[in-house]
Amino acid sequence: MNWIPLAAVAGAILFFARKASAESSSSPESTSQPQRKQTQPQRKQTQPQRKQKMTTDVSSGTFTKEMVNWGDYTPGRKTLALVVGHSRGAQGAEFKYNGKIYTEFNTMLPLAEKIRLLMPTGINTPIFKREKLNQYLSENRYLDSLNPDYILRLHINEFYMNPSGVEVLYKAGDKTGRELAEELSAALASVMKIPNRGPKPRRADENAGHLLWDVKATCVIGENGFISRDLPALLGNFDKVAGVYANVFYNRLKESTNA
């Protein structure tokens, strides 16, 4: 007769064991692992978005031959490549003068055109004008493919603490670049009647250094005054400024031309 209570006890033990097992399977600790695993695919999904954005930025930076005003370019002739500072989409320094907004790009473009007009015959003067600011790398490769004798980049400084003066930047250690910068800065300051800040060497890691070091040809950057102070002097002597550039570069190129 004693086996009946034992069976009842055993049944009760089995009932409570199953109940405890069910409660354990529904506890927060037991369900937390699947939730953490579900977050992994969400982190991986962000990678394609970053790569797609980089691809778009790179493709928009392609310089094309349509961005060059070739003039009467003739293969085989001596070449002075004229590069307009900044781009049509990001025009650099700007200043309002006599009711008109002057920018680095829209002031240096006509200066490049005037240099071409005043350059004696026999010299190629293609004018490079970027559409977007980030096209300078592919523009440099395009410049290299033409193998120009010299590259002149035309700029105007932007600084609103009211400084004044001309300076010409050149690649540090480039003897020809230094000589050009010395001659140009002195002559430009003279015709504009503003201070001569002189030639300025630039290392590759300094401001504007990439524009000088990332091309094969001797390159200088003409900073034609400070736009907030020297713009009237530039506009009032526009032909003379262009004449200085045309004369200096022509004198260096003419001996090896048939002009």
Image: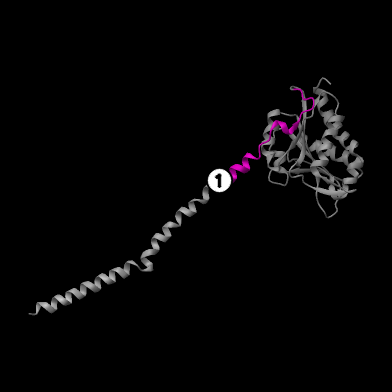
Residue 81 rendering spot, x and y as whole percentages = 76, 32
Q: Is 136 placed left or right of 50 in the picture?
A: right
Asked whether, in this view, residue 38 is left or right of residue 67, the answer is left
> Residue 229: percent from the left, percent from the top?
87, 50
Q: In what quadrant of the picture does the C terminus appear?
A: top right
Taking depth in this image into account, of 179 and 12 the one nearest to the observer is: 12
**Residue 71 placement, left or right of 204:** right
Mark 1 lies on residue: 51
Residue 176's place in the image compared with 195, above or below, is: above
Residue 131's spot in the image, x, y percent? 72, 39
Closer to the camera in the image, 215 or 50: 50
Classify mark 1: residues with Cα within 10 Å, few (<14), some (14-19) or many (20+).
few
Q: Is residue 236 magenta?
A: no
- Across and down, in percent, residue 28 comes to 38, 68
Of all residues, the one furthest to the left in this rendering is 1
The secondary element bearing badge 1 is classed as helix
Q: Residue at x 72, y 31 (%)?
A: 66
Judging depth in this view, the residue of 188 and 67 nearest the camera is 67
| Quarter of the figure with the N terminus | bottom left
Magenta region: 50-74
Q: Residue at x 83, y 39 (%)?
A: 182
Answer with the quarter of the image where residue 38 lies: bottom left
Question: Which corner quadrant of the image does residue 190 belong to?
Answer: top right
Compared across the picture, whether 78 is left or right of 204 comes to: right
Residue 209's image quarter? top right
Q: Magenta span has 73?
A: yes
Q: Amino acid at mark 1?
A: Lys
Total numbered labels placed on residues in the image:
1
Residue 194 appears in view = no
